[in-house]
Image (tube, rainbow, N blue to C red):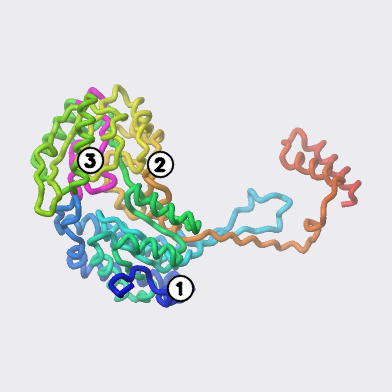
Amino acid sequence: MNAAEKLAPSHDELLSMRAAQHAWRATLLRSRLAVVRRLRQEIASAATGLAATVPANLPGALHRSQAETLTAEVLPLAEACRFLEKEAAQILASGVAGKRARPLWLNSVSVETRRLPLGVILILAPANYPLFLPGVQVLQALVAGNAVLWKPAPGTSATAHALRALLVTSGLDPDLLLILPESPAAVRQAIQAGVDKVCLTGSVETGKAVLEQLAQTVTPSVMELSGCDAVFVLPGADINRAAEAVAFGLRLNGSFTCMAPRRIFVTRENLEAFSAALLARLADAEPVEITARTAAFLGDLITEATLYGAKILLNGFGDFTQTSSGAHLCGPTLLTEARPSMRITCTDIFAPVASILPIDSPSDAARLHAECRYRLTAAIFGPNRQAEELAAHLDCGTVLLNDVIVSTADPRVSFGGRGLSGFGVTRGPEGLLEMTALQTVIRNRSRNILPYQPVTPAHAPFFAATIRLFHGGWKHLPSSLRAVVQAARKLKV
């Protein structure tokens, strides 16, 4: 294998990384956070240059502007730095179990929980948000005391190297963060070389392939996978706001977003007004580039849906054109009279396509939502009380009330899905904890060696009476206490 084909870190590089991580975990947390603080200042100074490293020609991002990259990736990454500076110490602090729930017979025992770094974290980055999504995971892994292997998505290595350079400038040991080649083979070789956890943001198919390999070494992972996300427009909703939000979600990053609205459940009383409002906002939206494979798949989904009764309200797909690269241009496409059983309403696809599903009442919403196995986020537009009631019945990772997508950039938000949308969380407090291993320290101040003595059948009456004394309730207290005393006398306890 020549130098150009080298994929995984060499044995010596991994040894250096492990040694650097050992020293890094011993570094005071405030010193680690000082690196993050300096990085935030570097990001502020180099924001435009950092944004320029994010390609504008990724699938679905044909028209992505620098302004959109600054708002969707650079600004949220800087906010994530600030969040860690302010909150990491409290999140990672050791905890001591309270005494109220401590068993009486363990009154000399105290319990402390600690959060320790895992070691080397492999982060598999997505193509659609190649700076913000992996960047936050890298920062959280480092703050927790780990070293990181970062595998960029195809075409995004420049972004990964740019952030690494800023981190090194901010004082990070270069051995703590290595950038892998973009090839999928780099993932396989890195896992074979030995990592302590994998964080993947990607498709379900990629997640299955990675999990199959991780099973061989029982390596833990976080899987942030695809979505086919729902929007609910309830009676009393602000129709214009809901339509504006859905249109934004379909346009954002060329709809190359896992949280983009794909299923829009609308009560029949709102159906006509909402459809008209949404059509008006999508009428002048520019087409985006999708791959030939996505175009063929989408064509099948639309044909199948119309055969089973769906109607096309807006057709940005029928007259698509092919680009010189072999990809296709697709404008916003909107179907109505769709049903949850249709493949187009329960499939993850990166294209500006959404389906409106009429519902008779809000009580139908949760049941119909559950027919799709992708459960990443859901958005509900309507009066607060009704929206809260519906949210409590939706099985998904995140529910947004009267909003889509935007608020998930809040650094306090821990983000993850359920079902086919994966497991584990990234970002926020729980995302930081995902980068640690829980260690419990139990201290026993007693010098009594009686608990270590062997038990015999003669002890059974004593233990039975003790259990009844502790857990049988007040009405059995006198009789239980007498039974314990009698059994103890027989044992000469």
Front residue of 226/208: it is 208
Residue 236 seen in the current view: no
Residue indicated by mark 2? 419
The answer to which image quadrant residue 264 occupies is top left
Residue type beneath disc 1: Arg
Q: Measuring 42% from the left and 62% from the top, which residue is drawn there?
A: 191
Q: Is residue 410 magenta?
A: no
* Spatial separation of the CA atoms under disc 2 and disc 3: 23 Å
Segment colored magenta: 242-271
Image quarter (top left, top right, bottom left or bottom right) of the N terminus: bottom left
The answer to which image quadrant residue 52 occupies is bottom left
Crowding at dot 1, Cα within 10 Å, few <14 / some 14-19 / many 20+, comes out as some
Q: Could you tell me residue 404's position as x and y percent?
A: 26, 43
Residue indicated by mark 1? 18
Residue type beneath disc 2: Gly
Location of residue 61 with respect to 341 vertically, above or below: below
Mark 1 touches mark 3? (CB < 8 Å): no
Predominant secondary structure, magenta span = helix
Q: Measuring 31% from the left and 71% from the top, which residue is drawn there?
A: 167
Which mark is first along the chain, 1 or 2?
A: 1
* Spatial separation of the CA atoms under disc 2 and disc 1: 35 Å
Secondary structure state at the residue bearing disc 2: strand
Which mark is first along the chain, 3 or 1?
A: 1
Q: Which mark is residue 297?
A: 3
